[in-house]
Amino acid sequence: MRRRNFLKKTMLGTAGLSVSGSLTLCSDTSLSSPGKPAIFGGNPVRTDPFLSWPVIQENDEKAWMQVLQAKKWFRMEGDYVKQFEKEFSRLMGSKDCLATANGTSSLLTSLNALGVGPGDEVIVPPYTFVATINVVLLQYALPIFVDTDPTTFQIDAQKLEGAITERTRCIIPVHLGGSSADLDTILKIAARHKLPVIEDACQAHLGEWRSKRLGTWGDAGCFSFQVSKNLSSGEGGAIISDNLELIDRCFSFHSNGAERKRSPGFSYHGKGTNVRMTEFQGALLLQQMTRLEEQSHLREQNAAYLTEQLKQIPGIHPAKSYAGCTRNAYHLYMFRYDQAQFAGLSRDRFVKALGAEGIPCSRGYSPLNKEPFLKSTLNSRGYLAVYPRERIDRYFKNNDCPENDRLCQEAGWFTQNMLLGTRSDMDQIAEAIRKLSHHAGDLAGG
Ligand SMILES: *Cc1c(COP(=O)(O)O)cnc(C)c1O
């Protein structure tokens, strides 16, 4: 207990240091005449790194050692994974939960439990991590891309119904960045066509739609605990659902077809794989979970503060959330960059110059519907055994997502750990962007 308090204080102490550091900086550099851009050899706005992620404390270390020394490393022998499933269900407000090896396998397991397979079409956004598409391809199904709403970065639910055919078997909305897809519209369309919905909530731990957790609205909600995610055990995943029978089927698939409540001996329900979570992951997640609420709250506060500042800079458009999104998990802080407002300075050079100022910024995803691997996969021997060539050719003729193409050219992201610092961290992000805005002409020319 004492050690924990100490660690907390040390964290705050470090944060306190950067507050005073930035105050000096502010009084030195008047906003009207920011110094030379760091990319031209000027002083960077920031030299401290942002908060290092993942955050570890003494209880993490203890939990890990307990598993190690008890020699119960396998979920069937220990209690940590089962306990984590119970706690995660409770935190999410779902009836049941299955822990898995990672987020990709939670999606793959859900698709299998719903019987999605060769010949089926699955509706997906083009703006997501590639895993959302890969799980569809692994089932020899066709990923049908619906264009992105560039103001929110989410799948454009208004265009969803037009993509449904008699072959559609499932809809996978992704809650990009921790904000929410337009669930009201998506669930209404899904109900009208009797289609199951798997929410890809891999970036959306504790995010909410109408004050109810993301991941609890569809038939299943999938989470990732990969190290970059807001809740992490290096690798890890979970499926939540109110449908106990669906989770039973997920269990079976995730453990080589075995029955969930195993009777003595071996009996198999169907084909499966092994994507079980280890006790190490379960024990670590139980500890990491105790900090999730506090960290999420801090991200929300810092993100709101940052948005107020960035909104005032011409050419920076922070991603908006739909009115129904009552809580954004802020796995990513996403914005659009309009180079016309920055004297024609390209997005890529803007990102580079921002990095030189000590503010790491990502350019985000590239358009998945245009990936060369998609073409080669759909033209592979396996795919052509399932689909007539004419179907594959028609697929690529109707595969454009122009809004998404533009968004991929304009996007910028800050990662979630950058939102776990102080207000002065946010001030420095804004200050660096204002500085680049001030020198945009030179930067575009140079
Ligand atoms: C991280 C992520 C996944 C995959 O999770 P892993 O744990 O890395 O397998 C899937 N979808 C989205 C949107 C993600 O961000």
Image (cartoon, rainbow, N blue to C red):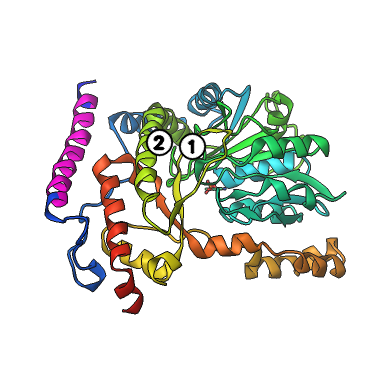
Secondary structure beneath label 1: loop
The residue carrying mark 2 is: 300
- Classify mark 1: residues with Cα within 10 Å, few (<14), some (14-19) or many (20+): many
Image quarter of the C terminus: bottom left
Secondary structure beneath label 2: helix
Toward the viewer: 163 or 256? 163
**Kind of residue sitting beneath label 1:** Asn
Q: Quadrant of residue 354?
A: bottom left
Q: Which mark is residue 328?
A: 1
**Residue 390 in view of the camera:** yes
Lateral position of residue 334 relative to residue 173, left or right: left
The answer to if 11 sits in the magenta stretch is yes
Report if the CB atoms under discs 1 and 2 are less than 8 Å apart. Answer: yes
Count the labels in the image. Answer: 2
Q: Position of residue 52 (x, y in %)?
A: 30, 46
Q: Position of residue 396 (x, y in %)?
A: 75, 68
Q: Position of residue 57 (x, y in %)?
A: 29, 33
Start-end of magenta stretch: 4-26
Q: Quadrant of residue 392?
A: bottom right
Q: Position of residue 418 (x, y in %)?
A: 34, 46
Which SS type dominates the magenta stretch? Answer: helix
Residue at position x 17%, y 37% in the image: 16
- Classify mark 2: residues with Cα within 10 Å, few (<14), some (14-19) or many (20+): some
The answer to if 402 sits in the magenta stretch is no
Q: Which mark is residue 219?
A: none
Toward the viewer: 296 or 211? 211
**Residue 422 in view of the camera:** no
